[in-house]
Amino acid sequence: MTTTQTTAAAVRPVELRAVTRRHGTGEQAVTALDGVSTSFAAGTMTAVMGPSGSGKSTLLHCAAGIDRPTAGEVLIGGTELGALDENALTLLRRERVGFVFQEFNLVSALSAAQNVELPLRLAGRRPAPDEVAAALTAVGLADRGAHRPSELSGGQRQRVAIARAMITRPAVLFADEPTGALDTRASRAVLGLLRDLVDGRGQTVVMVTHDPAAAAHADRVVLLADGRLVDELPGAEGAEAIAARTAALEVRP
Ligand code: ADP
Ligand code: MG
């Protein structure tokens, strides 16, 4: 890679070029994503919004290499995912991408600390001393490492999931409705944590949310409708402005 390419990849950890994802064929075909082109700048937080079924999860899954586009290209750190075989894609996903789900997806039989170190174990790495403790401390759970998920609140579980996603120092952290299952207070803590990762560590975060107040934490809000990017605005415009734009999409014919 030339220096210019390296720099471009660092500045744009994720890039989508005319990404289309279709499910099924013929009469049954559904176009979940329809020619989406965008990129997510390093050290920024982007909120992805849009009506139910507009393609938000599909966008995240394609951008994270969890799902493969029907057409178009996805680049992570300058690597085009379509060129990778399943093994290479699995490795890239494991090492360069963090993903957080609405339902946390922690392993219930493992402690919080064991959940956090799981991605390292899967990669055949032994965690460095204090690595897991530091990750738990960073999400405010220094004293909860020995607890099972069932012994933690929803907000605490999601923070464990974020620590687990961050342990490999991914180029980008994706979160699909990370506060969707949380009450207002726990949501605020999780959003504050994501914002701190961006501001304090230069983490790149892309988050799907239905909540305009959550989206207001982002630097940039992109709006999807029918699989297309139809609008965007700065998160700094605030929850009311974001709510007005999303409401306009809901009533589209
Ligand atoms: P959102 O996250 O915005 O609610 P999704 O990305 O989950 O939307 O879905 C976008 C569209 O694609 C919806 O119409 C959905 O029904 C369809 N879809 C998603 N996954 C599949 C699938 N595996 N098979 C068929 N249709 C799908
Ligand atoms: Mg979804």
Image: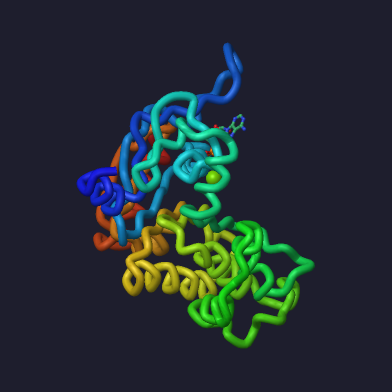
61 shown above or below 96: above
241 shown above or below 228: below
**Tally of numbered discs:** 0
- Picture residue at 46% right of the left edge, 53% below the top: 96
| Farthest-out residue, left | 4
Residue 35: name its quadrant.
Answer: top left
Quadrant of ligand 1: it is top right
- Picture residue at 53% right of the left edge, 41% below the top: 89
188 shown above or below 211: below
Depth check: 160 or 95 in front?
95
| Farthest-out residue, bottom | 143
Residue 69 visible to the viewer: yes
Residue 28 x, y percent position in the rendering: 60, 18
- Picture residue at 34% right of the left edge, 42% below the top: 15
Image position of 225 (left or right of 167) = left
Residue 4 x, y percent position in the rendering: 20, 46
Residue 225: name its quadrant.
Answer: top left
Residue 20 x, y percent position in the rendering: 43, 27
- Picture residue at 68% right of the left edge, 77% below the top: 152
